[in-house]
Amino acid sequence: MKVLRLPYLAQKEVLKEMEYEELFLISLVSKRSMRMIQSVKRKELTKIDILTSEKLYNFCAGSDKRTIVTLHHESRPTDITLRKEISLGNLVCSMEYKEQLLPHHPSLVIYYRLLEMDTIAAMVYNQLDVLFGSYATFSLNVQSRFDVIPTFLKSSRMSFWGSLNANVLEDYFMNVQEQEYLHITIRGLIGDLSSNSRLYSITGLVMETWHASLATAVLSNFKGRRLILKNVSGIDNEICQFIARWKSCLELENFEYLSVFMDPPGFANIDEIKRIAGFKDLTPEAKAFGQIVRSIHSSYVVRDDGIVAKTHINRRGISMNVRQFTEEQMLKGAEVVKGQSSFKTAMKLLRFPYLAQKEIFKQMMYEELFLMSLISKRLMRTIQSVKRKEMASIEILTLGHIYNFCAGVNKRTFVTLEQESCPSDKALRKTILLRGFACSMEYKQQLLPRDPSLVIYSRFPITDLISTIVCYQLNALFGNYVTFEISINDRYNVLPTFLNVTRSTMVFSEAINAHVLEDYFMNVQEQEHSDITFNELVGNLSPISRLYSSKVLRIKSNYRLLVNNVLSNFKGKELYINGSPIDDEICQFIERWKSSQELKDFELLQFINAWIDFEKVNEIKQRSGFKDLTPELKAFGQGGRSNYTSYIVRDDGIVAKIHINNHMFLLHVQSFTEEQMLKETEVTN
Amino acid sequence: MSVENAPVVDVDEAAIPVEKKMYYRFESNDKKEFRVSELAIQQSETLNRLVEAMGYTSEDVENKPAIAIENIDGKTLKLVFQWCEHHKGEAIPVDDGSVPKIVEIPEFDAKLMDIDNGLLFKLIWAADYLNIVQLLNVSCKKVANMAQGKTPAQLRRVYLLPSDEEDEAAKRAAQEAQDPRAREVEEEFEERKRQGGNSFF
């Protein structure tokens, strides 16, 4: 097919339909092909993420972060006959296409020789940059590269889960331009960074470190504008010194923001920090002064030139936000506000025009809408009419008897249910009635999305009941357009059941009684998704348990008996099993599917991390009547490339394609019969 | 620009602007007159359409009577025009359903809206009536912020929200006001029930 002879519009259409990795390979052919691809702007590609670890590079793109190019070492044990030669600049390497079952699986794999990994990665990056760089941005995520950190692109995120040599980091910063932003996670550091390391000059630095002296060094030497430190401990003195450094006006003149999240037990003596650093309390008026959004700050410090930084400190951390005004300006402004009576009279919300009411409810937070809806049926109806569709889903997280209701893009916790005995200042709690049950509530300052905001306290026996009431109310408010998901962690007696939940995720790190699970699935509607991680199951689930009717069921367990039971009784569409050896049961499952009597809606079975002997593979193939796929049959009905090796046929003729090797088994039911497949491929031939 | 310096002027107090821009004259329902620049008027969809339809020339603006805005008083209109003058030329936001809606109140707006609730209530009505999208957004944000940290009981007080019982009572009162015989019928029904009657009819 002479693509370059096609009319321009057709060329464009062809190139628009191609995968990114194909465009990448075509662009290597000639300058003309490169220009042609450049002219077809694939603007849906806004970001290319590059991930590198010790022996690997992954280039991912698109909204689903699909892997487009993977770099592996050539010694990787795969079938070498499938590899084909490819030239990248002056380097000759080999490549192979893999079947991409999931977006993060490899598609185009390029095999590099020892010591050439970063060079090839730089070439791939340069090529992609020339192709898509005018509209796509690149980010580099470095994970556990303890030898050398690539410098062909400034890394925006680095994680080192082992001990890193300080020289490696120092070399990296010496060889890249000054960075504007970096998120870095360091478990431990061997040696010290020099005090004028360019790490300290990054404009915005987020550092997660458990290495106390590194956190200390960062606080002592930081010269940028914004600094966030996480997981640190024992830095009371360093915080005081940092604030003193800022107050002196001699350093940190461009500094804007500091946020520190402490590991337990947190700061040793908050009062002492406040005293040494010279914290002053903010009045409500001064707190609001110069604020556009709600402020969490409760105190402030003053620089020698009078400039104010608003601060908030508790045991778990400190935040410090430098403002553009002086203490004098703030106090004067606050005085003016104080003199004016802002809210002397009530605001008649329901007498606003409809559009204004809608605007107000659109701008309220979910917890406020929840509390408003408790006031009257009329308010409930009004809030229902303002559809807050950005919520998309409400996730209920339970840990023991604590419930967190989370929603929105960042899964912000908006209601938390705690037991009354929870240690907190009871004087701050206010009484509320929830469907006749007296509880107490408190607003907490939410520093992170997962922190609590509105907390409702109730006595132990009724906490579960209160959770049902809250869920019922949220369903009435938002249920028309949001889905409900639950995540249950380590609860072993009675699992909370909410009728509107359609996705359940459960993690049991200890043995769970089968009847507890049985009861749960009896009391919720049929689940769209169930995802369960077991360690051990006490007793057996009944063969008619509704767990088996989940449309999509994911099981993570090495508990062989349970996996066997799931294979024998599953009635849904998709079944994923992680971490159990496969035996005769797989053959029985295939027989069950082939009989056409059961599993009529079944679509997909995937075993991963399973271990199957090569002998066993052959035995399964023989017993279940696997037939080999010719290249034509392999491609038939497949949108993209296919790595299926064989197929089986159901009694009614329907085909399921199969991929099997010694650690994975995949069975994918197709929508055509064997006859159709053979006939069509014969015509093609 | 501070609130005090915004170029909205009462006709009695201020001189005619020296710039050659067109300044329209508006009159509130309590007969206060304002001069507002053509660019500032564009913030209000209602007023913009009105002046476009009128097709006034510079002479018309001076010679013809001021355009009357019947249902907004002078105090509120002054705030509205101060806001429009400060934000003149700014793009009018389009609510494209991009969620979640994030509205920030600029410092000027915060100071402008540092008023009692009665006046804020009127300002929101005026923003709605004159279709000034961004003013409606920021003023509603201010009202939404009043809910922060409140219990249901406090919310009832802040927003003057009736309970179900109060709503029912108001509904009954409204029905009675519409049909004076309703009360009599209801009383008779109650009386028959007390006497043990099974059916009213």
Image (tube, grey):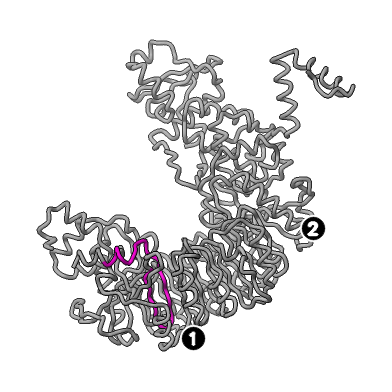
Quickly name the residue at label 2: A459
How far apart are labels 2 and 1 at the CA level? 50 Å
Residue at image coords 65%, 74%: A540
Task: Look at discs 2 and 1 and give the one toward the viewer.
Answer: 2
Residue at image coords 55%, 67%: A531
Q: Establish if A609 lies above or below A528.
A: below
What SS does tag 2 mark?
Answer: loop
Most foreground residue, A73 or A511: A511
N-terminal-most mark, 2 or 1: 1
Residue type at numbered disc 1 = Ile
Quickly name the residue at label 1: A190
Tell me the quarter of the picture where residue A629 sits. Answer: bottom left
Q: Is residue B167 magenta?
A: no
Q: Which residues are magenta?
A: A656-678
Residue at image coords 16%, 60%: A36
Mark 2, other Cα within 10 Å: few <14 / some 14–19 / many ≥20: some
Indicate the position of residue A603 as horizontal and vertical percent values: 44, 64
Q: Disc 1 is attached to a residue of which chain?
A: A
Quadrant (top left, top right, bottom left, bottom right) of the N terminus of chain A: bottom left
